[in-house]
Image (cartoon, rainbow, N blue to C red):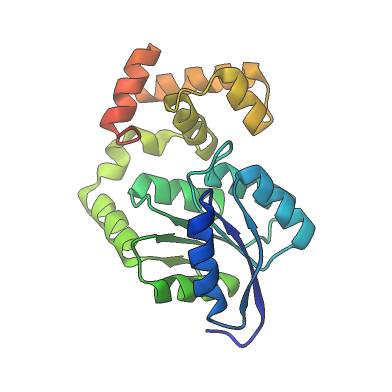
Amino acid sequence: MTDTPVSVLLVDDHAVVREGYRRLIERHPPLTIAAEAGSGEEAYLRYVELAPDVVVMDITLPGASGIQTLQHILQRDRDARVLIFTMHRDATFVEKALESGALGYVTKSSSPDLLVEAICAVYHRRQTLSPDVQTELAALRRSGSAAKNPLAALSAREFEILRMLVAAKSREDIADTLHISVKTVFNIHYQIKSKLGVSTDIELMHAARQLGLID
């Protein structure tokens, strides 16, 4: 723990979930909830308005994902401290989040105390990963499959756009959400297919399913 007051921005698209974690966090002073947000866009606005000490954010959000929102916040403030708190434990998600600048990654299956400890660690700029995430990363690196996984070749931006494509977002919707041009989306879409070794969108969807991006 820490004796220094720590303000937290809690970002999750489910109000009931946020309420539960708000109560948990506020039972551990000096942690306090500065604000809540239900989307990436709202999270960015609350961050600009309040400059909280730590952002605790899910990956799966309406509109821009947590990874894209993380990138957006860090473009605004390179010193921002962000903890990803999500159900996704796959090592690829972890690597993309860390690559994008997250200081911590904790899954929602972790113990409540671990979340509190992770917030404090991120506040002190110490990287922190929940044990299940550490296990996933260690297994990936031991097997050497990280080099064989085509997703490892994608940049964080390409990974984000791939996730939106397989979620049936149009190029126009993606461009609007990510504040880029439709032409840029088209070019990145092509690069993604090239890196994954596919030539059509049907093949892209099949590859995404095999790689675990689609249930």
- Name the quadrant containing residue 30: bottom right
Give the answer, above or below, for where 108 lies relative to 42.
below
Q: Nearer the viewer, residue 72 or 214?
A: 214
Please state if 143 lies on the left or on the right of 114 as rendered: left
Q: Is residue 9 visible?
A: yes
Position in image of residue 148 (x %, y %): 28, 37
* Residue ID at (37%, 35%): 151
Question: Does 206 sit left or right of 71 as displayed?
Answer: left
Q: Position of residue 87 (x, y in %)?
A: 38, 52
Say whether residue 205 is left or right of residue 30: left
Q: Residue furthest left?
A: 143
| Residue in the picture at 40% in, 14% down | 201
Residue 131, located in which quarter of the rendered image? bottom left
Q: Position of residue 115 (x, y in %)?
A: 45, 70
Most distant residue in the front direction = 16
Tell me which residue sits at (35%, 14%) in the image.
Answer: 202
Q: How many marks?
A: 0
Q: Is residue 121 visible?
A: no
| Residue placed most toward the observer, 100 or 82 | 82
User: Could you tell whether 35 is left or right of 96 in the image?
Assistant: right
The residue lying toward the viewer, choosing from 153 and 133, is 133
Look at the picture and state if 56 lies above or below 162: below
Which quadrant is the C terminus positioned in?
A: top left
